[in-house]
Amino acid sequence: MPLAALQQALAEAGEGRLVDDLLAAALADMRASRHPFEAELEGCLLLASLVEELTADVEGDDDGPSTDDVVERPIQQQVNALVALLLSAAEQEGSPDDAGLLRVLSTLLGGRGADTAKAAAERLVAAGVSLPRWAAPAGRPAVERVWCYRDTLGVQESIVVEFAYGHRQHAMSVLIDHELGGGVKDVWFTEGRDVARLRSDYASASATEPITEVLDLGPAEAAARLQRALEHPPCPEQPDQAEDVVRFLPLLRSRAAWLTEATAEVTPAP
């Protein structure tokens, strides 16, 4: 659907009410966040809900995003239109939670959306609005351990990066399928105590599968592999993989960019 047609459809359906409802729901969840990672997950859910609104209300599909929505349908322009409305509404409301939402979205969105969200958050802060404690560190966690689980045939690999905000850990697992073009097949996050045993669980699984192995990676190598995968179209095959990709791709892009930046900061000049 062309952008103009989308805007007309949203206007007829009451786009203001849709954006207000999404913003209210997002802020309610954000207020319950006590930690940057929780806020980032809520931001991902908000952006995914925009995709769901488009695939359900505009295209008549009420089953949520499918693999076609991830790979084939040109819906990004429509998503951007809703994001622009959402950012404008958040700045107009102007509460600390709105400023926090804008700050978090500035780390999850790409291109113009990120710049718009960042500028809006900065304007609110300059006007005296305080950022919530969960918002300021968002997008810049400490990088802890990096490793991969792969098959020795070179078909698939999972890049796992362990991060931490203070003492609270979370891990990102990215499944890359080289037979399907080298893009992201699935991505998911885990946190808390599960992070500490994640590598040992994979190592135990590898011990029973002779064609798989677990290898440590340097952060720079992991960043390069993730960026290469993001240059290719996502390639989920199953509905749950498509749902994961729609939901978590913004956070994956944010983490990959941060990993690249953090690696560059500690790499000595030649």
Image (cartoon, helix red, strand yellow):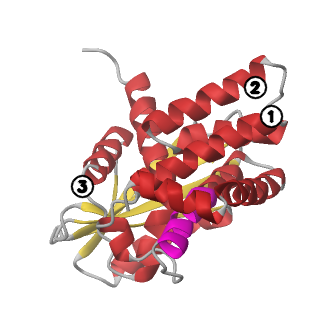
Please state the extent of the stretch shown in magenta in the rendering.
Answer: 45-58
* Helix, strand or loop: magenta stretch: helix
* Disc on res. 94: 1
The residue at the point 83 percent across, 56 percent down is: 32
Horizontally, residue 181 falls left or right of residue 29, namely: left
Three-letter amino acid code at disc 2? Leu
- Identify which residue, 151 or 136, lies in the foreground: 136
Mark 3 and mark 2 lie on one chain; the one further toward the N terminus is 2
* Residue 46 belongs to the span the image colors magenta: yes
Estimate the x, y position of residue 141 in percent, counting from the top left. Answer: 59, 40
Mark 3: which secondary structure?
loop
Three-letter amino acid code at disc 3? His
Q: How many marks?
A: 3
* Residue 152 belongs to the span the image colors magenta: no
The residue at the point 69 percent across, 29 percent down is: 121
| Whether residue 190 can be seen here | no
Mark 3 and mark 1 lie on one chain; the one further toward the N terminus is 1
Estimate the x, y position of residue 110 in percent, counting from the top left. Answer: 45, 40
Quadrant position of the C terminus in the picture = top left
Disc 3 target residue: 232
Q: Are marks 3 and 1 in contact (CB under 8 Å)?
A: no
| Whether residue 53 can be seen here | yes
Disc 2 target residue: 124
